[in-house]
Amino acid sequence: MTFDHSLNISRDFFSDSKFNAFFDRYDTFLMKEWNSINGRKFRVPFEQLLQFESSNYNTSLDEVHMGTILTEDQQKLLNDNLLKLGPWRKGPFTISNIFIDSEWCSNLKWDRLSKWIGDDLTDKDVADIGCGSGYYMYRALAHHPRFIMGVDPSLLFNFQFHTLQHFGSDARAVYLQSRLEDLESFSHQFETVICMGVLYHRRDPLICLKQLKNLLVKGRGTCILETLIIPSDEDDVLNPKGRYAKMPNVHYIPTLNRLKKDIIEVGFFNCDVIDINQTTITEQRATEWSTPTSLDSFLDPEDKNKTIEGYPAPTRVILRLT
């Protein structure tokens, strides 16, 4: 399993010649990333993992299961190299009896999201913008999409996804190490676009919403958007100064009313609320597989309804846009 394997799937799927220029640029970019300092750092544990046998994956439980039974020595080697490919932000996964206890219990968000999904991904072309390591992609595969393309600029997440693909390969899933704005020359349109945890990092949210809309098949595409909001009935936006819950680059946290207005302004016709949920320390927490600190350290120790900076604590909404 190499990055070329995933890229070749992309080329086969997007066989139209208009994609050749995009993929030629992507080839060059990916080779540069592969040979960068971080690329060489991640390649060492990644290549160690390729000696283990692959298997099918199973999404019947909250964690995605994959991999075969290993000896005790093999499990230690597997565990050590998986840790070197951390931090693991989204999950959980179980690979050959090694439980990757990621920072986020992403199954909780998936449970809220899947109330809508049902069979609506069947035979659809799906894009997951800001896909991370690919946890939601694997959960979505259980709903039988024709194809799902994860998009994220992170080289680490690229290695994590390809690690998962080695142990539980599915040819319908592809990772594109790219930014949303780079897809403006990527003219394929999707019936479903999932975008979670991205919008609040954008300095111009309207441009981001337009970019998401442009990825959709006109007239019948659906966008599942998850983002931070301020729990208020006002028409307002929080633009944090400095960090928000110790997160850098958080620029746009609107009220739900303001968010809906922005969504309609860019050309969506409908905006249905699937879920509103304040993030808890049960859902996001520090583990051996993540970083030493997490949400509990990012909230006011005297009032968990506020961030350490004094802003409203993270509340997330999931919306269905058409």
Image (cartoon, grey):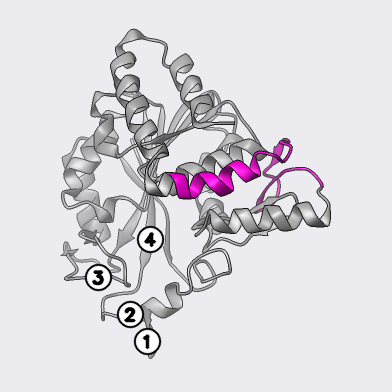
Q: Which mark is residue 303?
A: 1
Q: Which residues are magenta?
A: 40-69
Image coordinates of residue 128 in percent, x first then y, are 42, 39
Residue furthest out toward the bottom: 302
Q: Amino acid at mark 4?
A: Arg
The mark nearer the N terminus, 3 or 4, is 3
The quarter of the image holding the N terminus is top right
Image coordinates of residue 166 in percent, x first then y, are 63, 36
Q: Are marks 1 and 4 in contact (CB under 8 Å)?
A: no
The mark nearer the N terminus, 1 or 3, is 3
Q: Which mark is residue 243?
A: 3
The quarter of the image holding the C terminus is top left
Q: Are marks 3 and 2 in contact (CB under 8 Å)?
A: no
Q: Quadrant of residue 249?
A: bottom left
Would you name the residue on which mark 4 appears?
A: 316
Q: Amino acid at mark 3?
A: Arg
Q: Residues within 10 Å of mark 2 (few under 14, many from 20)?
A: some
Left or right: where 93 falls relative to 41: right
